[in-house]
Image: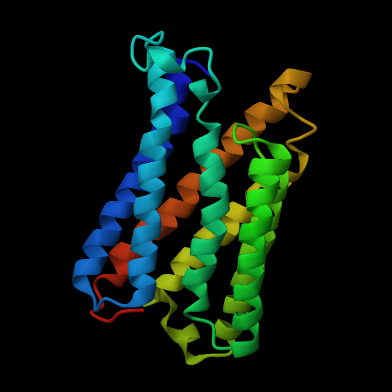
Amino acid sequence: MGLTDYFIFSFSALVFVIFSFITSLYYLKRVEVTSPIKLLVTYLGVVVLLEIIASYSVIGYYSNYQYFSFIENSPFSRNIWVYNFYDIINPILICLYFLYYINNKSFKSVAKITLVLYLLSSIYFQFIRTSFFENSSYVVIAGTFIILGVIFQFFYELLKSDLILQLKTYLPMYVAVGVFVFNVANAPLAIFSDYFNVSTGNFLFVKLQVYIVLISNLFMYSCFIIGFLVCSKKMKSF
């Protein structure tokens, strides 16, 4: 990826992430603060922090390692380890957010147990079975299916409630649509990523992957931004 490609793909996504966090803070000041809202804002803050940390490898690479010279020719020259942390905590924080809006107590109990098992198994597969500096397809795939399961339950209960008439000002709906589309779009990439990569000469797949990740990221954070701005006009917290 050249410098121009970086600004088109990575930088544009980073801008949307930062703007979604800024709008979440604006929303936070406009409504009654509740636990799920604080969790969502915290989640976006963590994402922004990880994205900023991950930028060190890009700065080092495009400065010919005039900056961060100590990472050159080391495993830390790639920022994949940062996103490995993201892949683990993302499903946990997202699912905990939606569990606030799910009424089925049995489902919530099973979901929380599943999240604990997911955390423990992810630590094993990511840091013991695989490597600190490599992707674990298990972590991504398992996390994706857990998120989709929780969101399907959220949609199911939403369809049976009176809130279906208030979707325009119901923030969790915006979040659910963005997260759902992102995970559905990226799940196939995670499944086949071990078979299609640059090292095996599959440049077309890698290029397609870059575009899908970019577009799905922009869509998801656009949903967040629109949701925060629209729902902030209604002085009620969800």
Task: Specify whether 172 is left or right of 189.
Answer: left
Task: Specify whether 216 is left or right of 188.
Answer: left
Q: Residue furthest left?
A: 29
Image quadrant holding the C terminus, namely bottom left
Please say if 227 is above or below 58: below
On the image, the x and y values in percent for residue 22 come to 26, 53
Q: Which residue is drawn at the image coordinates 45% and 32% (left, top)?
A: 10
Q: Quadrant of residue 23?
A: bottom left
- The answer to whether residue 148 of the structure is visible from this angle is no
Q: Nearer the viewer, residue 196 or 115?
A: 115
On the image, the x and y values in percent for residue 64 come to 41, 8
On the image, the x and y values in percent for residue 96 come to 50, 70
Q: Which residue is drawn at the image coordinates 57% and 52% (left, top)?
A: 88
Task: Specify whether 161 is left or right of 149.
Answer: left
Q: How is the image coloured?
A: rainbow
Q: Residue furthest front?
A: 128
